[in-house]
Image: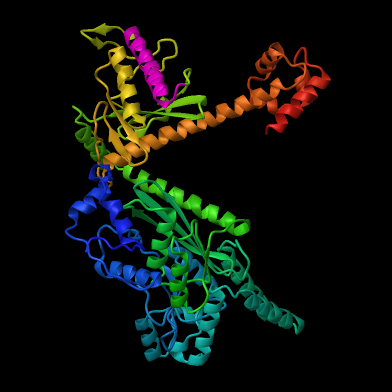
Amino acid sequence: MIYVGKAKSLRQRLNSYFADFASLHFRTQSMLTTAARVDWTVVRTEVEALQLEYSWIKEFDPHFNVKYRDDKSYPYLAVTMGEDFPRVQVLRGAKRKGTRYFGPYSHAWAIRETVDLLLRVFPIRSCSSGVFKRAGQIGRPCLLGYIERCSAPCVGRVTPDEHRALAEDFCDFMAGNTTRFIKRLEHKMREASAVQEYELAARLRDDVQALQKALEKQAVVLGDATDCDVIALAEDPLEAAVQVFYVRGGRIRGQRGWVVDKVEETTPGELVEHFLLQMYSESEIPREILVPAVPPDHDAVLELLEEQRGSKVDVRVPQRGDKKSLMETVERNAKEALTQHKLRRSSDLTTRGKALQEIADALELDQVPLRIECYDVSHIQGTNVVASMVVFEDGLARKSEYRRFQIKSAEGDVASIHEVISRRFKRYLEERSATGELGGEPVGEPIDPETGKPRKFAYPPNLVVVDGGPAQAAAAQRALDELGVDDVAVCGLAKRLEEVWLPGDDQPVILPRSSEGLYLLQRVRDEAHRFAITYHRAKRSRTLKESALDEVPGLGPARRQALLRHFGSVKRLSDATAEEIREVPGIGPSTAEAIVAALQGEK
């Protein structure tokens, strides 16, 4: 079994796969060419379909299903309530019956710091079975018993019932019922102080401080009674990063993350549904689960979770308030996790070499593209059109080499790509000719003799990547042909299906979704898109502010130019006071006030 899926309409589901084979993405093509046959099982309800789908995924581990696995074994704080003398410890891996778990935590040391503080107030056993047994045989407790970090049940200082009561109090505190313990200790401290038992009062004061310090290590984000899991996604066409924050008693008790392959086209709601049923099949289900998108079979998923928990479960998308803000925080963590996942691959020299070689093989280049330049165009309905150029050398970004362009033509993305490629390589040819040539090769270093720095466009790339499909790739190639540049390869990377297009080809080059070469091309394209968007937003903001000056009475073109010359930029002008604006010749008090009002209204 290579794939398990459910569908209300089998006909529609299969038609989505067995359509025109060439139009399918590589990952779907791979799944279909691997399959030998299709079988189906009919059930009565959507809940039964969900149960059967995930029981088969768990049993058969199909290769093409989304699997939420990570490369970490997250530590939990565990209390072995199933033993005669419960023990607190750090545990990883599969959960054990009769043990209460808290977490997961990002680091084991965070658990140990918390336990060290809490053992002062709840001195339960933390030693191994061997140490516990030996202490009982010799009749002497271990060091923790002597320093009052353990109640020493091994030598009978407390009865089994008294020790279990301590363990239950410890679990209640970790579960979020913190207020009553602190209030109880404070009450005892005041009583001891009243009868002049100052040493006992001081010890109780230190116990209160220890509990408060343990609480400070966990961020307070919601009300004390809030128990929920907050789930967020960050995705690209090939992968998705999932982050979960575990909130218990209004505090973030831990977090966990996964990066998963997307074998087929999935919506955020479908990813959430996969996650809920896979992750909560064997773990604690909270009363409330906050998600970024509602699962397609929301009612069926809810019924399944409530049946497993034994009580009501609320799965919803937060719309406002603290929970919405927390969801945004978790989403930022998911985006960072996806970025780090991609950067982890690019930081390895061997991986970068493999990526460059895969690109060279896929595009049939004579040599690996040690210098890659990528171009992207940004605009809103044809206004404020700009373009970006980013440079990657040896698979790493060279931000000092980035360039940005204001596009003069407004005839669409294809014309803009043609313009920016033409302008970039005209400058390259001019600066190459400035260095002189010998036998067709430039001589001397492409260094500006006046500044001593490399000329801006003196180095040609091995590969030009444009953000777009066959039309954009053809426009870039046409610009190079018109300039007589024949030693630079060109390709386009289309966003929708991550297809690589070569100029003049009818079919795209499909790189495997796990290809290091595709990851590198994605990173280059995404960086070009980010750089173009940043420039476009800045330019649009400046245009809006300049247009606000047009509405100021009595402020003509000459005075506007005088203002910009005096302050250097619209941003500095918008931050200036009326008194500072009046210093510009020709600007009176009323005009200065009108300028301030116009620009502050645009902020």
Q: Position of residue 164 (x, y in %)?
A: 50, 87
- Residue 275, compared with residue 361, is above or below; it is below
- Residue 568, compared with residue 335, is above or below; it is above
Q: Quadrant of residue 270?
A: bottom left
Q: With 390 as the anchor, is 317 left or right in this view?
A: right
Q: Quadrant of residue 189?
A: bottom right
Magenta segment range? Answer: 411-434
* Residue 159 in sight in this render: no
Coloration of the structure image: rainbow
Q: Position of residue 415 (x, y in %)?
A: 40, 21
At 44% from the left edge and 10% from the top edge, which residue is drawn? 450
> Given the current orientation, which residue lies at the most extreme right position?
589
At 61% from the left edge and 25% from the top edge, which residue is drawn? 543
Q: Nearer the viewer, residue 144 or 255?
A: 255
Q: Quadrant of residue 301?
A: bottom left
Q: Nearer the viewer, residue 279 or 411?
A: 411
Q: Position of residue 300 (x, y in %)?
A: 44, 69
* Image quarter of the N terminus: bottom left
Q: Residue 176 in magenta?
A: no
Q: Position of residue 518 (x, y in %)?
A: 29, 40
* Residue 419 in sight in this render: yes
Q: Nearer the viewer, residue 210 or 111?
A: 111
* Image quarter of the C terminus: top right
Q: How many marks?
A: 0
Q: Nearer the viewer, residue 506 or 34?
A: 506
Q: With 502 as the anchor, is 82 left or right in this view?
A: right
At 19% from the left edge and 57% from the top edge, which residue is drawn? 35
- Residue 364, compared with residue 172, is above or below; it is above
- Residue 462, compared with residue 107, is above or below; it is above
Q: Main structural element of the magenta stretch: helix, strand or loop?
A: helix
